Amino acid sequence: MAHGDGTKSVWAGEEHPFWERSTQVPIAQTVSFGYQDVDEWMAVALGKEEGHIYSRNTNPTVDVFERRIAALERAEAATAFATGMAAISGTLRTLLAPGDRVVSVTDTYGGTTKLFLEFLPRDGVIVELISTDDHEAIEAAVAEGCKVLYLETPTNPTLKILDLERLAAAGHAVGATVVVDNTFATPINQRPLALGADLVVHSATKFLGGHADALGGIVCGNADLIERIYHYREINGATLGPFAAYLLQRSVKTLHLRVERQNSNALAIAKHLETHPAIEAVFYPGLKSHPHHDVAARQMTGFGGVLSFSIRGGLDAVKTVLPRLQLAHLAANLGAVETVAGPPATTSHVEMTAQERAAMGIPESLIRYSVGIEDVADLIADLDQALAVGAL
Ligand SMILES: *Cc1c(COP(=O)(O)O)cnc(C)c1O
């Protein structure tokens, strides 16, 4: 019988026995792997025998992390990168050549948007970014033909939802490779490959790592596509290091527990804030008031640990309220065991002007709140005391 997410989180990818019967995954903190027998060395180097040569290409600790995430995404294969952006950039650059067209949406992660607007056009790639709110316009742009359809859901920071099954079908109708950034949902809440995507990318820095102490990225999909992306990465060199891979695979052992807790904490907080007098609007796909709640409920098994809300009083109120939070780092990361809060103006959309953020429907009075695994009653009490400011 196929194992469930909890069992896979703990065990998948470990090929025992490890060195000296170690029960835990050893850190192969080494650049190279030595061979006494030159024939054997050549066989491994030519891929005729299993083994490792040089850690920019492959490393046993990195392998465990790759196999574990591939198992959770129900993918044939995965290849890891130094960061999430390296994974996204490596995937797009593997798939796209000069003259190719890529269709995506305006609400992708800030760094991804920069790739689309600043770097890919420089290499002759034609980029079409369509409003995340308009599925028909995305389908129309895809129908004109494209090599890659790049999607992200839920989005950052306003938690918009894209219908993956519907859009993947549109992509496949024109022969596009469909790529989904699954960082916000994690494979515990959403499995894009089962909904029709060809590739799933993650910033492992966020929920997969979960402790904000290691950067990493990963791409999952069928073996042929992953082989091509692996080849791009081994030559371009944005490899995940063995120590970060160790931390990430160790943290994934609790992914299912952390995400379940973050789902329930976030939903309770979103519901509480929805009725709070200091709050203008709450953005969370688990709320019935969310415009695409039905799509989210269909394609996700949990709604994730990130919500955002706009508060009365604009940016000045944000500057007053944020430092009053006792149980949150004010920082740019998300998906950690600790709650993390910040405005898009300093985090996901720091590269943009206030006017550009407004044009994207990101209010200056928005706070992104990445819920940790603390007791939810303590987090709600903390938010209430922070929001109880006379000036608001
Ligand atoms: C953080 C993030 C990235 C980039 O990941 P890094 O590990 O910081 O390079 C990409 N996509 C999403 C949705 C993210 O939140």
Image (cartoon, rainbow, N blue to C red):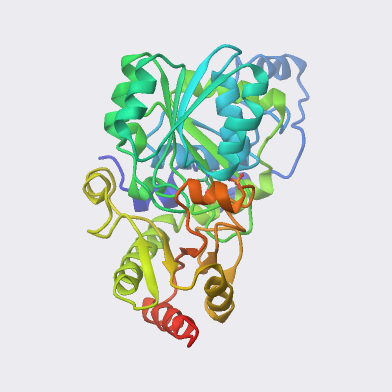
Closer-to-camera residue (135/36) = 135
Q: Is residue 21 left or right of residue 38?
A: left
Q: Residue 361's x, y, as percent?
A: 44, 50
The answer to whether 330 appears left or right of 132 in the picture is right
Relative depth, front residue between 254 and 343:
343
Q: Residue at x 53, y 66 (%)?
A: 340
In the image, is residue 176 above or below residue 365?
above
Apparent side of residue 34 relative to residue 268 in the rendered image (left or right): right
Residue 80 visible in the current orientation: no
Q: Residue furthest top?
A: 99
Q: Nearer the viewer, residue 294 or 190?
A: 294
Residue drawn at (27%, 30%), measured in percent from left and top?
Answer: 166
Residue at horizontal 51 percent and vertical 34 percent from the top:
219
The residue at the far bottom in this view is 390
For the point 48% across and 58% down, which residue is it? 363
**Image quarter hosting the N terminus:** top left
Q: Position of residue 131 (x, y in %)?
A: 41, 36
Along the line of sight, the residue nearer the viewer: 378 or 104: 104
Q: Position of residue 314 (x, y in %)?
A: 50, 68
